Image (cartoon, rainbow, N blue to C red):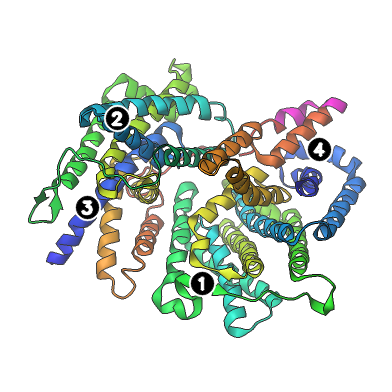
Amino acid sequence: MSPPADDIATKESVPFVAAAGAAAPAEALSGAATGWLAGRHLLIAAAIVVAALMPFFFKSFVTFQLTQVMVYALAILGLNILTGFNGQFSLGHSAFYGIGAYTAAILMHDYDVGYVWTLPAAGAVCFAVGFLFGLPALRLQGLYLALATFALAIALPQILKFGPLEHWTGGVQGLFIDKPDPPFGLPIDSDQWLYYFTLIVLLLLFLAVRNLARSRTGRAIMAIRDHPIAAAAMGVNSSLYKTLTFGVSALYTGIAGALGAIVVQFVAPDSFSFLLSVSFLVGLIIGGIGSIPGCLVGGIFVLYVPNIAESISRGLAGAIYGIILLIIIFVMPSGAAGFVRLANAWLAGKWRPNPTARSTLGQPRR
Amino acid sequence: MELLLHQVMAGLATGGIYACMALAVVMIYQAIDHLNFAQGEMAMFSTFIAWQVMQWGQPYWVAFAAAVVLSFIGGVLIERVLFRPIHNAPVLSSLVAFIALFSILNSAAGYLWDYTIKTFPTPFGHKPLLAGLADTHEVGMIGVTLGLLGLLYLFFRGTRLGLAMRAAAANPESARLVGIRVGWMTALGWGMAASIGAVAGMLIAPVVFLEPNMMLGVLLYGFAGAVLGGLTSPGGAVLGGFAVGVIENVAGTFIPYVGRELKLTIALVLIVAVLMVRPSGLFGRSVVSRV
């Protein structure tokens, strides 16, 4: 299942470097990128077509899993906006995922809101929570910010189980919600419909992030990552953009949470523990920090690798998971996107020697 | 008043556990500039080694020494084998390596010694002290933590090796120019942190009982304590650890209605509130960077 997704990663990451990376690789690669710009668009289109056909070739359980991969990819994209673009660090994104999931579940369970409308609602709620949380928390940096967000991740399951809120949250038991049927009498089952629904949301949000990264705002956000003091000197309102980025990041992860709740049809406090934040972080790093298509690789990793480890040895599943992680980090220290970037630079160097590209790309980004 | 005193004492007792862990966290942070997320699992593994040696019929202190020495060697080996090759990788990639190490140690301990809860002996006994407000083990644990802190202070301030380690952490390039073997200093830092973790684990195990997941909660609180006290200050970390324990207990008892169910949340919110006022922790130095 992974090749099509990898395909997108391979083709997309080059222009992303051109848009987001340091000046030298941008220049070095833009020549190569424009060369096969048309081909790249074609490949993305082909990947989308393959993705659209997949539910017809797999069993409904595989379709369900692929849907979850996309949900995780979206959540990781949320974290990526914060970490990759803005250079902040969060251990609290499980909380935003959980808030999004519960927003959707409560709206559907108690108020009979249509599932489509729960997504903007979850996004809005998470944006507000993220923005308000970001206001004070973003005075902190690095590990101190990590602790603040960690507090959020620890607090959420406890708050969801909290007695007086049980009326809405269902307490430890959680909430069950109904599976949506395909609309307009489409001749597909509901798993397939959810797959397409998630795919459409994912593509729209990927496109939105890509545009954000290329906009004036996106450049301001990345300038803060690369050099906060210089950015401030250039007139970038650092605290405003940091807080906004936190809000947007929470919005994405919250929409992912709402989608996750609809796909799994169940929410419970302990699904949104601190360990989920760790999973997102691992997925982000494995996919490649700052890479949009890398998020899909991350989603695949988060969903499948623990299962693979379990299938190799039940007793030592954790150890095998750890060893797989270590091997990946040893082979590609900057994640899948960094690996692809290096491979590209190597190929470019082979065909057209360009010392700048090689020397700059070999270095770690951050 | 008596209730408050009781809660503060109970808080100090659990705080002693966190302080132990916070000290180990800060040690490794000083040496390698990263928070070691696998620190708790390393301590757990060391404690299992001590337990195994005792199962083989050796007395407590032999097991204690074996665990400390083996942990030191293990810490150095982990640095040499796992972290040396990726020391140039981006910061977040080494975070993944820590998570991997965490997962491997946890799973291996479960596989070797299974998940049943085991008791672990204490050299201090469990006699009540101060009219039942504390017991001998808790006081002993606090004493050992403070003793370790003193020893570390002397080591870092008073010995050439300690000075070399500080130099290697503070400015690796310059340290290398004056002939300090920076790579080995880092490995030494890992070894020391693993040994401190082993001591912490063996002091904590009589309270929380020995099992592969015993350290997860403790590490998170230790982490919180270390950050509260300031990651650059071992003394601050110990104090931070005690503070987390006391805040957690007192808040749980005295804040009406929400206190008991949300005591951990309240403790963390308070910590974050403190960080708002002092963004580098209570006793940490604020980092000044050259533009």
Q: Which of B121 and A209 is in front in this view?
A: B121
The spot of residue B30 in percent (x, y) is 40, 34
The amino acid beneath tag 3 is: Leu
Q: Main secondary structure of the magenta part?
A: helix
> Can I make out residue B36 in this image?
no
Which disc number belongs to residue A29?
4
* The stretch drawn in magenta includes residue A357: yes
Question: What is the span of residues highlighted in magenta in the rendered image?
Answer: A350-360
Which residue corresponds to mark 3? Answer: B12
Q: What element carries label 3?
A: helix
Query: Sequence-wise, which precedes: disc 4 or disc 1?
Result: 4
Instruction: Kindly report which numbered mark, 4 or 1, lies closer to the viewer in this rendering.
Output: 1
Q: Mark 2 lies on which chain?
A: B
> Residue placed at 32% from the left, 46% from the top?
B283
User: Is the same chain shared between marks 3 and 1?
Assistant: no
Q: In this view, does B38 lie to the left or right of A230?
A: left
Which disc number belongs to residue B53?
2
Q: What element carries label 2?
A: helix
User: Is the same chain shared between marks 2 and 4?
Assistant: no
Above or below residue A285? Residue A193 is below
> Residue placed at 44% from the left, 50% from the top?
A144
Q: Which chain carries label 1?
A: A
Residue density around tag 1, few if under 14, some if 14–19, many if 20 or more, within 10 Å: some
Which residue corresponds to mark 1? Answer: A174
Residue density around tag 2, few if under 14, some if 14–19, many if 20 or more, within 10 Å: some
